[in-house]
Image (cartoon, helix red, strand yellow):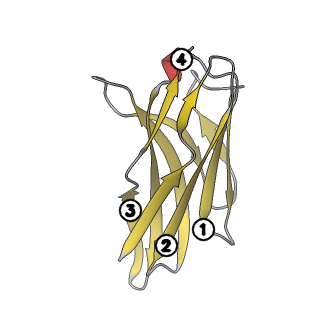
């Protein structure tokens, strides 16, 4: 079995910060590309940021300069540092990862999501 577990969500005031974590565990050899997505209430799930195993990153325009994605390959863990949070960042944040299993690369694993609410 494989699990992606997110943590770090919560309620924060506008302008505040939060740090999300996502850890992959179970029968995996290693983790390839990883990404954060978010889904606001009544909206589609959208890509927030991506990071390759080697550390190359990309961001949605809406979060550039405010969010930073990073990872620790020794811990199979990815992070999302979110600064200068805005009410429009309110969403459920999901971790996505491509995992190396015993038989090879397997794409598209999802975590259960963690709620981020930005409100005064």
Label 1 – label 2 distance at C-alpha: 7 Å
Label 1 – label 3 distance at C-alpha: 15 Å
Q: Is 31 left, or right, of 42 in this rendering?
A: right
Q: Residues within 10 Å of mark 4 (few under 14, many from 20)?
A: some
From the viewer's perspective, is the residue at label 4 or at label 2 nearer?
A: 4
Q: Which mark is residue 107?
A: 3
Q: Residue sitting at 70 percent across and 28 percent down?
A: 83
Q: Secondary structure at mark 4?
A: loop
Q: Which residue is mark 2?
A: 25
Label 4 – label 2 distance at C-alpha: 33 Å
Q: Residues within 10 Å of mark 3 (few under 14, many from 20)?
A: some
Q: Secondary structure at mark 3?
A: strand
Q: Secondary structure at mark 1?
A: loop
Q: Which residue is mark 4?
A: 119
The C terminus, quarter of image = top right
From the viewer's perspective, is the residue at label 3 or at label 4 nearer?
A: 4
Q: Residues within 10 Å of mark 1 (few under 14, many from 20)?
A: some
x, y percentage for residue 98? 45, 62
Residue extending furthest left? 42
Check whether the beta carbons of the residues at disc 4 and disc 2 lie within 8 A of each other: no
From the viewer's perspective, is the residue at label 2 or at label 3 nearer?
A: 2
Q: Which mark is residue 76?
A: 1
Residue 119, placed above or below residue 83: above
Q: Secondary structure at mark 2?
A: strand
């Amino acid at each position: 079995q494989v699990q992606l577990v997110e943590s770090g969500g919560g309620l924060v005031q506008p302008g505040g910060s939060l740090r999300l974590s996502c850890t992959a565990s179970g029968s995996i050899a290693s983790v390839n590309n990883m990404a954060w997505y978010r889904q606001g209430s009544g909206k589609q799930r959208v890509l927030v940021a991506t990071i390759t195993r080697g550390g190359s990153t990309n961001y949605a325009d809406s979060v550039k300069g405010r969010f930073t994605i990073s990872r620790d390959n020794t811990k199979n863990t990815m992070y999302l540092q979110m600064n200068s949070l805005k009410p429009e960042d309110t969403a459920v944040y999901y971790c996505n990862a491509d995992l190396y299993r015993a038989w090879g690369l397997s794409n598209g694993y999802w975590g259960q999501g963690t709620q981020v609410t930005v409100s005064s």
